[in-house]
Amino acid sequence: MSFVSRGFQGRRRQDADPSRVPPGQYVTPDYPVLSAGPTPHTALETWDFSIGGEIDDLQRWSWEEFRALPSEEVTVDIHCVTKWSKLDTSWRGVSIDTLLENAQTSAEYVVQYSDGGYTTNVPLADVTGGKAWIVYEYDGEPLEAEHGGPARMLLPHLYFWKSAKWIRGLRLQSEDEPGFWETNGYNNYGDPWKEQRYWGD
Amino acid sequence: MEGAALLGRLTWQFGDVVDLVEETAHVKTLVLDVPAWPGHRAGQHVDVRLTAEDGYQAERSYSIASAPSGTGLELTVERLDDGEVSPYLTDELRPGDKLELRGPVGGYFVWEPSVGGPVLLVGGGSGAVPLMAMIRERAAAGSDVDMRLLLSSRGWEEIVYRDELARLTGDGLVVVHTLTRSQPDGWSGYARRVDSEMLAEVGPAAKDQPHVYVCGPTPFVEAVANALVGVGHEPHEIKTERFGPTGG
């Protein structure tokens, strides 16, 4: 017989479709904050966004240029490795497809890098094809610094640490390069549906 | 960075509940014996998984309170009234029960004697837990590193580990309390939220480049981390661990 925690009833949620909640996650109406250090506060005048690395021409946008790019409104479910999931979050931002439109590259991996020194790595194929955005609005309001503003990655099909807050650019690489949490015990890929939380999952 | 650590898989395993210790009215320590425990470093956490009779499971993360030591493992848990897992751990669990867990998790919010000092620990409420593991590790190792704990609690009765902290004070360990909501008669210590002035008084000064660890609820961590940067601490020397209002 498999293990049962004596006396544990649990609180199954009635208000969330279980097929939208990955294993080991619970749904929260709140928006908890997770980060490893102080929140950076970057002035919009000095903010820019770059795509570099193994790419023919470095791409770079100032805040004004970035905000002039075609944007999309996205409503998605997000899943944090610390076990909370939040359903139907709504964002506005620029699709990575739009940013890579003029980029010629043979790279297969991407390192996202941020103010404050945070990095996280993903296969390039995971941020293209309508799967990822650089977002600057949450729920119709400018994204708060605490939640990654002025702009963060939104990569909802992976655990949320793969969506870098305070993002400043993407580095395209032919070699994979584990980022901050990935070198500190967390999974290199981070698929919530396979519960890839930690090394070896 | 701890990138050189082995890429071992964290498997689910069982711990035997040996004892439950009441720390405050809302906070209990679970004393476990985990026969296959691989060891941990101060500051790391574990995932706990509960399973109901129909197979329903709930997982949460809890900080490890104990210093690394054999198969013994202590988790300190704050009971969240609207929580799903923490009330089970604090109210239902009994010695002799088994608890399913895996870990240790996290290689960043970690202190060990080789990291050295000076060290500033700033905790809010049960955010003291991973910081206590560091204090215990320092004591166990006989380290005389300059380590200071600034602990913000609502009141005297709500200070987690109060007596043990008093015992461990000295030989380079300084413990400073601030009581934000109520203070006992004759209290002469801090009685307000942590601010820049308090951080400057407690020290170590930013010029001494202390390793700083901050743990508590999100608004606490945000405020303290911002204040630390404001008084000149290097952002990359400030490690934070936050827990949200839900989570339990």
Image (cartoon, coloured by chain):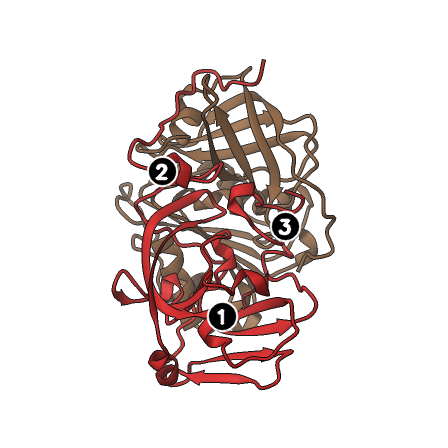
Q: Amino acid at mark 1?
A: His
How far across and down, in percent of the image, does residue A150 sit?
37, 72
| Label 1 and label 2 in one chain | yes
The residue shown at (33%, 32%) is: A13
User: 10 Å neighbourhood of mark 3: few (<14), some, or many (≥20)?
Assistant: many
User: 10 Å neighbourhood of mark 2: few (<14), some, or many (≥20)?
Assistant: some
Identify the element where label 3 is drawn: loop
Q: What's the mark number on residue A105?
A: none
How far across and down, in percent of the image, does residue B1 sit?
66, 60
| Res. B202 image quadrant | bottom left
Q: Which residue is mark 2?
A: B158
Q: Chain of mark 2?
A: B
Rendered colour, chain B: brown
Q: Chain of mark 3?
A: A
Rendered colour, chain A: red
Question: Is residue B213 visible to us here?
Answer: no
| Res. B24 image quadrant | top left
Q: What's the mark number on residue A185?
A: 3
The residue shown at (65%, 57%) is: A183
Q: Which residue is mark 1?
A: B233
